[in-house]
Amino acid sequence: MSASEGKSASAPRGRWMWIVVALFTLLHWDFWLWDDTTLWFGFLPAGLGYHALYSLAAGGMWLLFMRVAWPAHIEEWANAAPDDEPRTHA
Amino acid sequence: MLQAAAQGAPAAAAPVSHLPLFVIGAYLAVLVALGLASMRSFRGTSKDYFTASHSVGPVLLLLSVFGTTMTAFAMVGSTAKSYEQGIGVYTLMASSSGIVHSLVFFLVGIKLWAIGKRYGFVTQVQFFRDRFESGGLGTLLFPILVLLVIPYIVTGFIGAGSFVQGATKGMFPDTFATASPATNGAIPPWLSVLVVCVVVLFYIFQGGVRGAVWANAFQTILFLVAGVTAMWMIASSLGGADAATAAVLAKKPEMLAREGQIGHGEFLSYMLVPLSVGMFPHLFQNWLTAKDAKSFRTVLIFHPIFILVVWMPCVLIGVWATGVVPELKVPTSNAVLSAMMTKYVGNLFVRGLVQAGTIAAIMSMDSQIMALGTMFTEDVVVPLAGKGKLSDRGRVLWSRLFILAIMAVSYWLALYPPPNVFDLGVWCFSGFAGLFPLVVAAIYWKRVTTAGAFASVLTMLGVWSVLFYRGLLQPALAGQKPSEPLVLGLMPVAWVVLAAGVALVGVSLATRPPSAATLKKYFA
């Protein structure tokens, strides 16, 4: 286990990333482009171009999220022997 | 020749090549081969049949999860809806899914993978039964999940039928003659869907979930390439992307913006629709196949980008279709994608490949079918037979029998299609999204109770049923085209999620907390 993973096992890290996720989600609402028919690069309507960039940026944001807020402890928990057998509630 | 077709020359008299159909046939043959290959890796146990023995790595997990979330809804449905509503379709479903899907994979997917691996759960119902200490909750959830998945499968069948019909127009004028020029000589949906069913059944029966994962991975690669190629070739035939968009700007400028097409309330409430992935039974099963939690990292990062690669071409093709002269003649908007390919992708071999890629996206409903078979076996047959009474072989057999039954019902329903697969898909997703508060509470909220869970599920069912009847069923039965079913300016999903959430919290706070043993098991 790496040092950073060891640190995350004791306490969730990178909680500030949730603020980034919330702000990024707000940016999805591009109300200022609602009636804009300007074409980017001569063919891409502004509303569509913005959301194409948004999709790419979403990938980047999750990459950052993985680096600073990955819950490394979950692997250990999943592989640990369970305290009890799954109960049947049929 | 393309120019002549675009100008409305009498193309019906010209012989239509069967080459694209052979390419599609070759694609289906590869799927059969994958089914046979996955059978060689099958370890003979029900655990392997239902979870691939938790052996799937990051790349295969990314491809299979993406493939299973992108179906006819993504390819055929998005093009059809863009043809009707313009570019806003991408902003409603694609970019929002990019952020919300990955968020749900992180918040729900990884946790459920961990819980499933630790305690050996194979289905959602098993987890909910145990988490809420209630067999009754599982009994309530099972039919609801099945009823919500079936329309999703049906959208795949409808998409396949419409697409193949459009793609093979004029190929068999003697065998499949019809009065409509839009369908004359085309392979009818009942036949193409039947072939799709047989192929899907083959590779699922051979390799179980591993067969579905491999097929989905292959299909994902194919339809990622197909969408971009189709967009590029169609744009070239229309005189370039600039000319294609300029034609729309001149003829239907409203298609290039959202003013008058989509309200802000509708836009914002659409963000709740992708929450549905948190309760898809097939995704639950896909998550369980993951080798480790790290495998999810690739999924989270690349999922939004893959959505861009698939949806952008489809939306642009749908929008460009509104600007072509003469106007596109299609039986329903579901056939827009195939009609654009047939009309504007000149190279027959490439056209066949692109069409095969589109069918690949449509056919990725295999995981949904596989999940239903697993649920029936694990949630109905095994509890009825008694713990340890059913052999591994018996479990696999029951699963296959139920899959056959589901395929038959879905096939029959697909013969009576609604006018737009997109709308049907959104209704299914809205129902699943209504169960999202339940799964989040089950994972993160210690105070949620069994009564609260029941209240949430029943409220979701009630609100969804009323809105579904009012929004889709009633107009369809009256022979009218359903309009956007907004309630106070918001999509039905907003009211379904809100009502289910309020019921969950309200009833939970008013009832007895869960046992200490359960809390220790899930929150220690």
Image (cartoon, grey):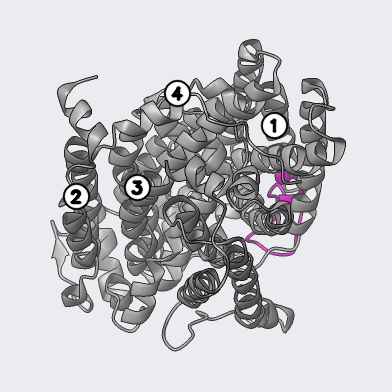
User: How far separated are the C-alphas under marks 4 and 2?
Assistant: 26 Å
Find the magenta span and give its range: B175-193
* Residue neighbourhood size for the residue with mark 4, other residues' Cα within 10 Å, grouped as few (<14), some (14–19), many (≥20): some
- Name the mark nearer the viewer: 4 or 2: 2
Q: Residue at x 55, y 50 (%)?
A: B280
Residue at the extreme front of the image, as rendered:
B516
Q: Main secondary structure of the magenta part?
A: loop
Pointer 1 residue: B199
- Name the mark nearer the viewer: 1 or 2: 2
Q: How many marks?
A: 4
Pointer 2 residue: A15
Q: Amino acid at mark 1?
A: Val
Q: Do the residues under discs 4 and 1 have CB atoms within 8 angstroms?
A: no
SS state under label 2: loop
Q: Residue at x 25, y 37 (%)?
A: A70
* Horizontal and vertical percent position of residue B242: 21, 58
Pointer 4 residue: B291
* Horizontal and vertical percent position of residue B259: 28, 81
